[in-house]
Amino acid sequence: MEYRLNRDVHSFLDPRTKLLLLFTSSVFVVGNAGEKWMFVFYWILVYLPVLLLFIEKEWKAGLISIAIYVGSYFAQTALQNDLTAIESVLALMLYIITKILPTVILARYIVKTTKVSEFLAAMNRMHVTDKLTIPISVIFRFFPTVAEESRAINNAMRMRGIEMGAKKSTEAVEYRMVPLIASCSIIGEELSAAAMTRGLDVGKRRSCIWKIRFGIFDWIIITLCVTCFIWWGIGRFFI
Amino acid sequence: MIFFDNVSYQYTERQESLKEINLTVNDGEVVLVCGPSGCGKSTLVRCVNGLIPHFYQGILTGQVTVGGKDVSTTTLRKISRHVGTVFQNPRSQFFNVDTTSELAFGCENFGIAPEEIEQRINTVVNKHDMGHLMDRSIFKLSGGEKQKIACASIAVEPVDIIVLDEPSANLDYKGICELQKMIASWKEEGKTILIAEHRISYLFPYITRALLMNDGRIVKEYTSKEISSMPEDKLHELGLRAEKMTDPSDIKISVCDHTGQEKLILSDMKYSYKGEKPIFDIPRLEIPSGEIIGIVGANGAGKSTFLRCLCGMERTCKATLTVGSERWNNKMRRRNIYMVMQDVNHQLFTDSVLEEVMISQDEENKEEALEILEALDLREYADKHPLALSGGQKQRVAVASAIASGRSIILFDEPTSGLDYEHMLQVSRLLKQLQEKGKTVIIVTHDIELLRNACTVTIKFDNEMYRTDARM
């Protein structure tokens, strides 16, 4: 069967929209800007990442995220008064989870659904310098690499009988980090050598085979984000 | 045209070097640069693609000219428009996560129009029949598939010189066949090709000549005919691999008698990825103990997965191994079988060689640990950091901790991939040393020379059949 490249496949959202959403989510969910005033937007921003997962048909990840979120939320509200020391530490941890989880899910979604090439092109359109975008673009490749390496290392540790609760459990963390850092840095060096032999360089014009453009959903999300900031501004400066 | 005029090079951090290289490679030639590890063949390649002097630190004298341009005064980006490189390790040469973008990457960097890149990708993909590899994650591909993508992404670029640095090091038979096809098509297109390798027989049909390097110098030049008719022992003398391309399913198994010998009985081993048909299903397999057992078989027969299952690493694989009167389940096997992984870097954790050996012992015993190191020529490195050693030394450290663990069965996953003849023999001697200690050694390999040199029993994985040449 003859292969034909389809350049018109793009993910549901444009990379620029994703970044704007990530920024908005950081400000209003993690940073909790506007507090009660932003009530409605807050809850939209909390559940939007899960909706995005569902759109990507990641049913399992989406449901697990909801379960963790709802679980920590109610556990944390239950732990309100007369807390012992341990309970208050626990409550604090749960609170942090409810604050950062939605943004973490969103970040993971962005890393998984954005092509490096698309990202570079989108940044270029916004006239962001290569000195910033090229190092950032390595992140997309970095996470799966770390995951792959640490799986192999984890297997090796179990085989050698070094794991939590077995011998040397205190050193287990250190033992994991040494080979992980070593192999990631080797991969990093080889990768930059390879990228340079393929003409990657700072400050030169690149082309991009993927057609990046804003679609209807991009405009909806952009409108949402902009509205968040305007509504917050109204609350902050006029009321 | 590639032109070396009295070129010498010395790395700041490494021993390897180049000494007084004079070389002319004409357009359309396919030149093999061979020699044992550390002879400088990779360094030579790096002078052509510009990584020397632009990426690696060192002292370069003399002049390298590629396509009429002096490499040391031309930027890497400009060189890369003419020279494409395929590296040894398919794991670390991709910048993108999806295969399609990776194919486009080089052209995008040069700012070529998207429509033209699309054309080029379609041509290459259809020519090499790799539509099934498109739009996939790099992380979901096998080593051979990754190397094919690496070659294809160079083929998409409009380069006229292609250099390859030990491209077959991590490939099995099928992967090498694919690589051959790529090289053949580049040759047909009239590209100039320079290949650094010590596994050479697969290249004989394509090369116009071969250069033998040793200790940084080009010591001899052979015509294609001279090198391809060279007898095996002569190639070995030069530190080169002599193995002819052999399809693992063609390996003949002759039956040896092991009756009356103690044996390991593997039963009910079955493994499949989620929702797929089983990769292997072994109702019963008898393995004579105290032997060096080589497992061979076609690609995708699940040989490496078999090893992981055998040592109990795959939780979903249930199986029983009967050793004497004991029946080992997953957990028992994990405690009693030691595996030396293909990438040893993954299993060296501590900050000294001695400690590495001692954490494997049930009771830490420094005397004994030092004895083990002594026997493996590692005594002088006892205080060194394991990750600062050479590849072969690291592997010996892993073996040292296997011995220290006192486990009776030791597994090896491709212990000789990417090794030259001398180093392969070292591994082979190491395996025999383990056998003398009474260990049962099981290795998965596609290295026919290792199989012939070391293994006393062969098990063949083929079309869901698991045959052994041991009669018990």
Image (tube, coloured by chain):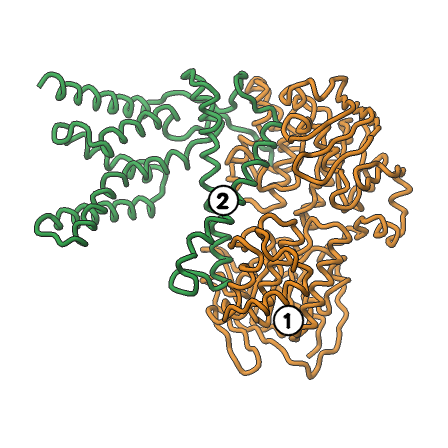
Chain colours: A green, B orange
Instruction: Specify the quadrant of the image occupied by residue B176.
Output: top right
Q: CA distance from mark 2 to mark 1?
A: 33 Å
Which sits in the foreground, B360 or B378?
B378
Locate residue A87, reporting x and y percent.
17, 53
Query: Going by the image, does B430 lie left or right of A26?
Result: right
Q: Is residue A45 visible?
A: no
Badge 1: residue crowd in 10 Å (few <14, some 14–19, many ≥20): many
The C terminus of chain B lies in quadrant: bottom right
Question: Which chain is indicated by disc 1?
Answer: B
Locate residue A17, reporting x and y percent.
34, 25
The label number, if any, that marks residue A181 in the structure image:
2
Report the residue at 79% width, 53% height from top. B243
Instruction: Specify the quadrant of the image occupied by residue A44.
Output: top left
Which sits in the foreground, B207 or B401?
B401
Locate residue B259, reporting x and y percent.
70, 82
For marks 2 and 1, give the one nearer the viewer. Answer: 2
